[in-house]
Image (cartoon, grey):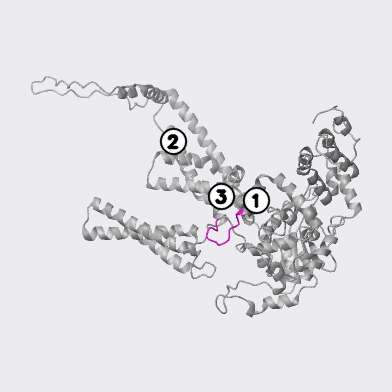
Amino acid sequence: KCYISYSLFYSVGTALAIQVPVVGWAPLKSLEQLGPCAVFLGYQALQFVEVMKRRRKLSRMEAWKLRIQVGLVGLLIVVALIMIVAPSGYFGPISSRVRGLFVKHTKTGNPLVDSVAEHQPASSRAYYQYLHNICLLAPIGFLSVMINLSDSSSFLLVYGTFAYFFSHKMVRLILLTAPIGSTLGGIAVGRIVAWCIRQIWGAPLGVEEPTTNVPTASPVETTKNGKPIKEPKKKKMKNRSESQEKTSFEGFAKLKDAFESASNSSEGIIVKRTISVILLVIIYISGGSFTKYCWSLSQSLSNPTIIQKGRTREGNMVTIDDYREAYWWLRDNTPEDSRIMAWWDYGYQITAIANRTTIADGNTWNHEHIALLGKTLTTDMDEGYEIARHLADYVLVWGGGGGDDLAKSPHLARIANSVYRDHCPGDVTCRAFGFVDRNGTPSPMMERSFLYRLHGHKIKPGVEADPAKFQEMFRSKYGKVRIFKLLGVSQESKNWVKDPKNRLCDVPGSWFCPGQYPPALQHILDRKKDFAQLEDFNRGEADDEYQKQYFENLQNANLAKKRAAVAEASQQKDPPSSGSSDDKSSSSSSAAGPTARPTEQVAEWKKRRYNTWENSEMSTNMWKIISTNSLQALKDWMADDPSAVFVRSEDGRGPMWWAFENRRQEMVKILMDAGVPHTDKDGKGMSPVDLLEGGGSS
């Protein structure tokens, strides 16, 4: 029955799956899907042996010999096929999402997968949030099932072990633990309740239950004459180890007998009944709270996630409906053929609620396309606009703090750099893009980015999108969503994409039509390098250097940030000159525009950083540069961000204190020329000069 059911399931299911264009021959090519195929082939080999066994009437030993022979022959054939087919690139790699189940989060080697919060390991808080009391009961049920092993209990043990392992690796897979957790929890409650009932309605008080270990007198056997038959003398135990083993467990046996005797006494029965009543009351109370929790959780999970509850600064509870209102605005106020550019997280919502075409959605298998979107949003304003005007008509930005687009943007830049290596030169994890302190101060690269300009448009001082390129069309009530209209959209590119002749459909009239980029973006696409993850073992090109630097930067974030600052400074001094004439003019205008900061803004940054005492990555990196006498790194950082030398740590000290303390005379001169004070006091009332005179220690 198992053979027939599995063979039909696999053959029919695979035959139907390969008819779907998106799936294709993946069930027979992808390594993560070849396991069921191996089981299917193994079943066929075993069934062949069973047929031959019945026909030839083989004995059990002969049948096992035939199984071994068939298995070896099949294994040799499979190995030969693999050696022939593998060099041609037939087999697909294990995806990084599956690989993420066996490695720590943020270390799959794929920045797109590492950026998804649902791929993080599950915490104990997450288990309790979704399973509640099951977290306590399921382990008890698991242990009780282990004591009484059977076919059914073995299935529960295997299911529970694998469900917990994979859910612990990825929080989204906690869903897998719900059925087995409920089953094991129910077993635990059932056995506890059954034990409690037995104790309450068991033997009456005053009547001790007989112990099973008390020997009973056996009838004496007699001969025909009535004389008792003498038992033969037992041979003395020659094996001394057996006697020692018997005496070693004698103490445990006596302890067990004493415990059973005490528990079966009148006092023991009272204690057990008291414990039973307490357990039943606890189960009843916990069951009631568990039921209420389940209903409240089901209601919260059933409510639409785009409508949330929040509190105003005055403490009033309000309903935040910004997202739905934004999508409805798109639906009601934009042409039907409008294309909306937004990060892929909201793609499905835009398609389903706004009924508009989105540039990307949750189907993130096209890594290179997501990277182009990330590059558009995190590159310079001018270059981002030049890309966007060939792809979209509107740009939708999530704001309002929390997990908005700006908070996610470092991941966007990292994904972009995995394909467009000139996005963050020499910095595979794009540490140059992000916030430099806890006050939300953007790095130079973030400050001049397409996304930062739209996100902070007329909200942050000095931040405004170019009115010749963008027009703000919608701002939600609580500022969670903003929609901008792209001015100067390339109608030629839009018509080219809409032309059916430029669609690559698998068959005429099919719904499966991978898109093509308009020719105007070719100079951008020429700079990309298709992403090769660790599992792409059968590709002609390897990307070992990228993967090596990626993991190194994740393990030493501070060093990576320092290197990124140096690379950013050198890039500004010597901007790239490759690309078309339009691209050159765009780059030069970008470098001359957002990169050059107003004197007032630099002065404001200096004042803010000098008056803010806190331990941050910036203060730590500055201390390392000065303590190691990295003079060139200090100069490069100052060229990139003149206000960086005004940073101060929690104790009130800063670069000038550290330079005096470490006797860095040349650095002291540079800092003085930059205007850093050398007579101010730290938290202990000491000036930098006091440290030079030996009046204090670090």
Q: Secondary structure at mark 3?
A: helix
**242 sits to left or right of 498:** left
Rendered residue at 75%/77% (across/down): 491
Above/below status of 567 relative to 614: below
Q: Which mark is residue 174?
A: 3
Q: Position of residue 698 (x, y in %)?
A: 79, 31
Q: Which mark is residue 355?
A: none
Magenta part, dominant SS: loop
Q: Amino acid at mark 1?
A: Gln
Rendered residue at 72%/60% (across/down): 323
Q: Which mark is residue 195?
A: 2
Q: Is residue 90 visible in this depiction of the protein?
A: no
Residue 476 image-quadrant placement = bottom right
**How far, Cα to Cα, is label 3 from label 1?**
32 Å
Task: Tell how many labels.
Answer: 3
Q: Position of residue 385 (x, y in %)?
A: 77, 66
- Check if residue 258 falls in the magenta segment: no
Q: Nearer the viewer, mark 1 or mark 2?
A: 1
Above/below status of 377 relative to 647: below
Q: Secondary structure at mark 2?
A: helix
Q: Secondary structure at mark 1?
A: helix
Viewport quadrant of the N terminus: bottom left
Circle 1 crowding by C-alpha within 10 Å: few under 14, some 14–19, many from 20: some
Q: Which residue is mark 1?
A: 549
Q: Amino acid at mark 2?
A: Trp
Nearer-N-terminus badge (1/2): 2
Q: Position of residue 147 (x, y in %)?
A: 41, 38
Q: Which residues are magenta?
A: 535-544
**How far, Cα to Cα, is label 1 from label 2?**
59 Å
